[in-house]
């Protein structure tokens, strides 16, 4: 008996499958994830409880979930502008780092300030730093036709080394026992927390506001329409008279500013100073978040919460199951694999003959 | 500077650069056929950990090398299936592979971190790396199969029209790239370190990726570029030892900045770009049915 699998291009476009496929991907990830736990001699059900339930079983855990989801959501919302326009900015990690350097630098410069304007200034410079780092690939692409995937990736590593230079060099805390970290920011430069004793901070409001703005931009503005058109076909957008190069610039600046904002929120929020490892790969993980959320602003909020849970679950797994926290990366990788794979069903019809 | 010191430094450069040559030459072939694989770092780590664990468990170098290579075949095979058959986005799939590989290798290697092993002599691999560059250069420019690989990378539709199997060609180049990456990882954990530690490839996968662009997709330049990149990294340590007050981070970012400059140089001119970069790089191939 021979099974022949045939595929055929879909003529209709199915919204149902488009929004269902992230759920299928998550389900498949859990299914394959349970095998990983079995191989490690752990009970899958117990492990999943520790991985996905116990981290959010108390108010501290829920606060931590939002602490992790906030930067992911903000970066992914920014990236969605680029991805909608078919521009692959994969250097959000570097833009995040630059935002932290610019905004954090302001905090260190005025380290005896008690002014209420310090934090807004830091936030502004965080966004400027990220946007500045993102304009480099934008300029290189529009002026020299360079591939933005490679340039934004290279610039990420340059940014990480610049941060490293500052925290072991000029910005090193003299009272820090020689550790590679800066002085703590003054209280006026710290992001207010929402509840006493919990780390969740006002960045959450920013994420929600950016989400709504993005929704309006995508659905109600000419700019959103231009993005959609040029994403589907850059030639069509040029025939329509849209300035494609300007679109590249705007989308890069928006996504860079968002990443910079997220970086500043990290250092002036939960961390409180500058040091080497300010981000556990948020800039790269946000790419997964953006795809998993289908580049839809509300979808991105949901997927940021889910991916944030893999970070928390991995920490709990390390604590209680004695497996490395990197297991979270395994789940993140699997989710993206399956999501990309199920996208196939979105575009093609599959028959078994 | 004495002759001994110079020879010593050259020796260290030789030993530390070899993983870049392996991973770089593999990725070069993959990219020549029009596929951009960002999963090098993940492939290297899994190759490193598979080889290491097998060596600890069996004590047999042959088995460990073999399984390390198999890990590269499997992972890059999955990547190839996704991007070629399911036509997924190459960038996202490559990143997923890297993230997955970082996680998987850390998970598998946890119990083995710090286990002492007898390392292999790196010079075998150094010789092989030079031979490989020579063979790949010969293959791409002088053989018919090499020509097919390049044709597929330049224009997959024309290659298909000429009767070449685009998908099969790309499967082979992706898997070759995957095997080379796992060899690079194997070299790091078995010869260079020799030990296992979480995330021990330390970003070499990304440097190898930069290297291919820096070399403008030419095997010989890749070899030269690898030794420039490797030499700069070693020079940084030595200059600091002598007491030069240039920040080390400045040297560490040099490969990336140099690659950016090369990229701007080749991209700003259409003819130059056509002569260097494969035209179909990162463009999905959809077979008309």
Image (cartoon, grey):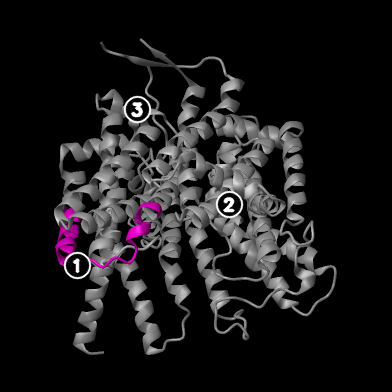
For the stretch drawn in magenta, the main secondary structure is helix
Q: Mark 1, residues whose alpha carbon is within 10 Å: few (<14), some, or many (≥20)? A: few
Residue under the image location 57 percent in, 75 percent down: A166
For marks 1 and 3, give the CA distance.
50 Å
- In percent of width and height, residue A294 lies at 60, 34
* Disc 1 target residue: B118
The nearer-to-camera label among 3 and 2 is 2
Residue A304, horizontal then vertical, whole percent: 62, 44
What residue is pinned by disc 2? A312
Q: Is residue A341 above or below residue A320?
A: above
Part of the protein shown in magenta: B107-134
Q: Quick check: B278 left or right of A33?
A: left
- Residue B157's tag is 3
Quadrant containing the C terminus of chain A in the rendered view: top left
One can see residue B262 in this view: yes
Ranked by sequence position, the earlier of labels 1 and 3 is 1
Q: Position of residue A347 (x, y in %)?
A: 49, 22
Residues packed near mark 3 inside 10 Å, few (<14), some (14 to 19) or many (20 plus)? some
């Amino acid at each position: 008996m021979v099974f022949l699998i045939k595929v055929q291009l879909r003529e209709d476009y199915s919204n149902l499958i488009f929004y269902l496929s992230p759920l299928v991907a998550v389900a498949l990830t859990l299914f394959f994830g349970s095998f990983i736990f079995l191989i490690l001699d752990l009970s899958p059900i117990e492990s999943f409880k520790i991985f996905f339930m116990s981290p959010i079983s108390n108010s501290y855990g829920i606060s931590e979930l939002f602490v992790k989801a906030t930067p992911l959501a903000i970066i992914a919302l920014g990236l969605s502008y680029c991805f909608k326009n078919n521009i692959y900015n994969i250097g959000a990690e570097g833009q995040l780092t630059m935002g932290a350097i610019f905004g954090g630098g302001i905090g260190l410069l005025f380290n005896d300030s008690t002014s209420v304007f310090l934090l807004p200034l830091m936030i502004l410079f965080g966004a400027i730093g990220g946007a500045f780092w993102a304009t480099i690939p934008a300029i290189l692409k529009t002026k020299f036709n360079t591939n933005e995937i490679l340039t934004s990736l290279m610039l990420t590593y340059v940014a990480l080394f610049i941060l490293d230079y500052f925290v072991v060099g000029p910005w090193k805390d003299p009272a820090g026992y020689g550790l590679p970290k800066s002085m703590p920011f003054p209280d006026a430069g710290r992001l207010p927390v929402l509840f006493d004793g919990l780390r969740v901070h006002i960045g959450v409001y920013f994420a929600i506001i950016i989400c709504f703005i993005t929704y309006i931009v995508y659905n109600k503005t000419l700019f959103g329409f231009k993005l959609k058109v040029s994403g589907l076909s850059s030639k069509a957008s040029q025939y329509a008279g849209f300035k494609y190069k300007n679109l590249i610039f705007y989308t890069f600046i928006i996504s860079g500013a968002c990443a910079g904002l997220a970086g500043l929120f990290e250092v002036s929020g939960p961390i409180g100073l500058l040091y080497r490892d300010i981000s556990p790969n948020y800039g790269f993980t946000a790419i997964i978040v953006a795809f998993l959320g289908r580049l839809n602003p509300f979808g991105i909020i949901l997927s940021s919460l889910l991916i944030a849970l893999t970070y928390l679950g991995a920490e709990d797994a390390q604590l209680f199951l004695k497996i490395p926290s990197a297991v979270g990366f395994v789940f993140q990788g699997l989710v993206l694999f399956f999501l990309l794979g199920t996208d196939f069903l979105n575009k093609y019809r599959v028959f078994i003959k | 500077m004495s002759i001994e010191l110079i020879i010593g430094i050259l020796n260290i450069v030789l030993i530390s650069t070899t993983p870049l040559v392996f991973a770089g030459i593999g990725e070069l072939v993959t990219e020549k056929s029009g596929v951009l694989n960002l999963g090098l770092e993940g492939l290297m780590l899994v190759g490193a950990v598979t080889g290491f664990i097998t060596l600890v468990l069996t004590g047999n170098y042959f088995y460990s090398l073999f399984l390390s290579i198999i890990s590269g075949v499997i992972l890059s095979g999955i990547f190839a299936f996704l991007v070629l058959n399911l036509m997924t986005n190459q960038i996202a799939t490559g990143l997923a592979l890297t993230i997955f590989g970082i996680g998987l290798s850390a998970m598998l290697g946890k119990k083995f971190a710090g286990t002492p092993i007898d390392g292999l002599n790196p010079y075998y691999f150094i010789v092989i790396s030079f031979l490989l560059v020579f063979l790949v250069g010969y293959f791409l420019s002088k053989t018919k199969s090499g020509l097919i690989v390049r044709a597929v990378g330049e224009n997959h539709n024309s290659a298909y029209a000429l009767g070449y199997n685009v998908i099969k060609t790309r499967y082979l180049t992706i898997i070759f790239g995957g095997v080379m990456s796992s060899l690079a990882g194997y070299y790091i954990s078995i010869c260079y370190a020799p030990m296992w530690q979480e995330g021990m490839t330390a970003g070499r996968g990304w440097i190898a990726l930069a290297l291919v662009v820096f070399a403008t997709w030419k095997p010989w330049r890749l070899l030269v570029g690898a030794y420039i990149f490797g030499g700069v990294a070693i020079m940084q340590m030595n200059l600091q030892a002598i007491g030069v007050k240039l920040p080390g981070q400045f040297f560490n970012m040099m490969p990336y900045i140099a690659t950016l400059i090369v990229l701007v140089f080749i991209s700003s001119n259409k003819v130059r770009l056509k002569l260097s970069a494969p035209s179909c790089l990162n463009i999905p191939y959809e077979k008309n049915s």
